[in-house]
Amino acid sequence: VVDIKGGPDEGLDRLGQTLAVKGWVRTLRVQSSVIFIEVNDGSCLSNMQCVMNSDADGYDQVESGSITTGASVSIQGTLVASQGSKQKVELNVLKIVTVARVRNALAYATHKFFQENGFVWISSPIITASDCEGAGEQFCVTTLIPSSREATDSTVDAIPKAKDGLIDWSQDFFGKPAFLTVSGQLNAETYATALSDVYTFGPTFRAENSNTSRHLAEFWMIEPELAFADLNDDMACATAYLQYVVTYILENCKEDMEFFNTWIEKGIINRLSDVAEKNFVQLTYTDAVELLIRANKKFEFPVKWGCDLQSEHERYITEVAFGGCPVIIRDYPKDIKAFYMRRNDDGKTVAAMDMLVPRVGELIGGSQREERLEYLEERLDDLKLNKDSFWWYLDLRRYGSVPHAGFGLGFERLVQFATGMDNIRDAIPFPRTPGSAEF
Ligand code: 4AD
Ligand code: MG
């Protein structure tokens, strides 16, 4: 928060800096192609004047009246000298976002649901050598050697060795490769085989270069892991959880939900009320593929058994085929799913499930885990994954295990679904996407 106390030169020493101002809109004037917003955060009497041109991110939301007096906002911009006489400095707005109280309510309801159902909240590491999803979409951890530091023998040793003229940054966690986690699941499994039902709720990272309305490079994930559970228990838990948090915000965030219903997605309250009350559709992957083929629709990606379902297929299934109801698809082909999923008796499919919801597509991905050592080792070999690096995960089976299952829910996709926001970047105030990490 920029604290402008109104002294004669206040803020002048920060001219040109990019800052974020968080507070509440006091006044707002829309002129032909520029909007003046006065923001105050309660720390002082004077307001911060923010000047917004039509190319600023969020301009349309302000112009259309979705952000008005009283709105809680985070405004990012450059501090410049003011033309006006009332203040010395003003903020040249780059971006404005409303701070969603609903995100907070969904986080609270998440903990409430799991705590009330006997789950233990656990923390999984952010830095890890394992690639849970096996998709190679990891950011690696590097150590910066400050240039001012004199290079002693030991610092030179710590600098990764050049390989083909390039620095091999992947060897840089004190000489070993390490990455930002894509999922806390594998660790959650070890907790679950000691504590029974557990859940994580923390940041996860994916180095996928996807510029879509539903992908972030950094997102929060909720990952329950249920001990002594199979895929049916997993699907029941996912359904109960989603219904619980949706009911919670309908009951506790009435004013915000009215706002979203009016300005963001007409009818969202009715749609969420249906989600809270109705049974979700369940079908197998094989039936879903048949349904898509029978739809006889020209998809960009043609459908055949074995293909990964794309977002156009997922949206068709929930939005058209089942009229806006969440749909759980289960028993996917093993070749399009991760190594840890439990092989089904047919040898071709695994006990996986994805929950699809309208507008967002995949909200949840989960599975029953392969607890049989010999099948797990076979799968790691098939996928040419290094068994040695999974020794601890294999030991969890080698010395006895229990049937267990779990799922992951992308928290920003939940916020998107529950508020009707078109773009996942509006579900987190500082979205991290390819090329955007400056604030
Ligand atoms: O389907 P995913 O990749 O599954 C896992 O990570 C499992 N290990 C979870 C588990 O069983 N414990 O990711 C789970 C969910 C997706 O359904 C989606 O909601 C979200 O995480 N997600 C993303 N959200 C935003 N941006 C991205 N790039 C995301 N990738 C996945
Ligand atoms: Mg998935």
Image (cartoon, helix red, strand yellow):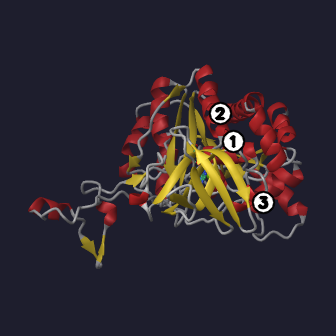
Which is in the foreground here, disc 2 or disc 1? Answer: 1
Q: Nearer the viewer, residue 214 or 185?
A: 214
Residue 336 placement (x, y as % from top left): 62, 58
Q: Is residue 422 above or below residue 274?
A: below
Give the CA distance from mark 3 to mark 1. 41 Å
Residue highlighted by disc 3: 313
* Mark 1: few/some/many CA within 10 Å (<14, 14-19, 20+): some
Residue 139 placement (x, y as % from top left): 43, 59
Which is in the foreground here, disc 3 or disc 2? Answer: 2
Residue highlighted by disc 2: 105
First along the sequence among labels 3 and 2: 2
Residue highlighted by disc 1: 70
Residue 13 placement (x, y as % from top left): 38, 59
* Mark 3: few/some/many CA within 10 Å (<14, 14-19, 20+): many
* Mark 2: few/some/many CA within 10 Å (<14, 14-19, 20+): some
First along the sequence among labels 2 and 1: 1
